Image (spheres, rainbow, N blue to C red):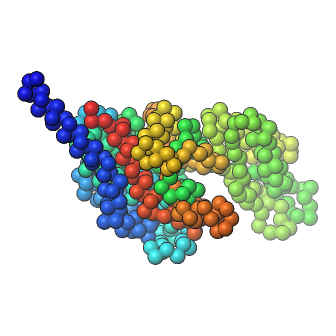
Amino acid sequence: MHATKICFIFYFLIFSSVSLANINNLLQSIQTDYENRLDALFKDFHAHPELSLAEFSTAKKIAKALRGHGLQVTENVGGTGVVALLKNGSGPLVMMRADMDGLPLKEKTNLSYASKDMQLDPVTGNTFPVMHACGHDVHITALIGTAKQMVDLKDYWRGTLMLIAQPAEERVLGAKNMMNDNLWERFGQPDYALAFHVSSMLPSGVINVVNGSPYAGADTVDIYVHGIGAHGASPHTGKDPIVLGSQIVNSLQTLVSRELPPRQPGVVTVGAFHSGTKHNIISDQAHLQLTVRNTSEKTRDTLLNGIKRISENLGRAAGLPEDKLPEVVVSEESTPPTLNDEKLAIRLRGLWKEKMGTDQVTSHQSDGMGAEDFPFFTTEPKIPSVYFAVGGTNHEYFKAALDGSGPPIPSHHSPIFKIEPKPSITAGIAATVYALMDLLPAS
């Protein structure tokens, strides 16, 4: 055998064994990084959350950390968004996204690192207490941890890694704003896209990935009901918007139950009904606020068209003139459904079971219809993507809540929401790195 060929084979075997050792040491490396650095970083993020569209300090901390790992970082993308690139030869471009905004809530967890911060909301102009009540602090900490591992493993993958810290997910505006800032034109369009959300409804460290839609599409809808004001003792002289609004609320309940196929999910919820100022005054207006959920464009059209049809025709039935019919306004705070690429979801589920254990990976479809703005990155143009969940609740606490021997698990957006950070963050990093190494092969 030629000496050059022998040397090549020897080098390949040594290189492969080193590669395998590094990959096998991944979990220990993540644990060490968590203890040395990520724990303090997470607690700082949690103690100092920022509201949607005002994540100025958070974005700077993320950018500084990613630059510290040698990534090429661009700030102020679509507002406070951060884009970091790690170029490592020719190969695919894979994006990993983490959202970074907090919520206007006063924290009541009694954690030693609980938020006590207040912040001016740029949307409402009001000052609120702020809390990371949805786990976005977990996401951005894991993003930074992922960067370190991918830098350490640069010899064993090829291509380009794009890490995105996204603002304003809670207002479903951040992804859209970043795309409107020519995201793909400036940084390249990914071949694959990934994201995860920590979930209090799963035991900490468990990975959940579904083939279909992990999150619904959502529309924020306002109905402005016009009436004719009158004295409460003389209702016949006016047109009561409260009565008309109540009829609209009741009739909307038939949209899902009678106009959607039984196996086609949808939600129409009236979350607020505002009208009137005093006991004996018939108001001249009412305002209904709705959230509408879907898993397909067809369902969305059925529900939104139905809301408009019901509202306007009930206005006509009440005797309102055409220029005073109820107005239906669909807000820009809307998002399409999150749809996992089936082949990619199956591929990654198998990978995670192999690397993390079959008992650590599930495929449970949520009973609810929560929404996300991640699909603004993946829908137009279509990018194969997987959005997965990482469990965040202590195993013993979770078990006690299920069997009734303990208190219920606090939900997301609750002032007592809390995550067990170490197993959640480390599992999120591990799942992400395993996926990235699979999608960015060295060969």
Please say whether residue 50 is visible from this viewpoint.
no
Q: Is residue 59 left or right of residue 218?
A: left
Residue lying at 92% horizontally and 64% vertically, measured from the top left: 233
The answer to whether 183 is drawn above or below residue 117 in the figure is above
Counting from the top left corner in percent of width and height, residue 434 is at 37, 44
- 234 or 327: nearer the viewer: 327
Q: Is residue 248 left or right of residue 126?
A: right
Counting from the top left corner in percent of width and height, residue 344 is at 46, 35
Residue lying at 27% horizontally and 48% vertically, measured from the top left: 22
Counting from the top left corner in percent of width and height, residue 83 is at 34, 48
Please say whether residue 419 is visible from this viewpoint.
yes
Residue lying at 53% horizontally and 63% vertically, measured from the top left: 394
Q: Is residue 234 left or right of residue 207?
A: right
- 124 or 67: nearer the viewer: 67
Q: Which quadrant does the N terminus fall into?
A: top left
- 439 or 217: nearer the viewer: 439
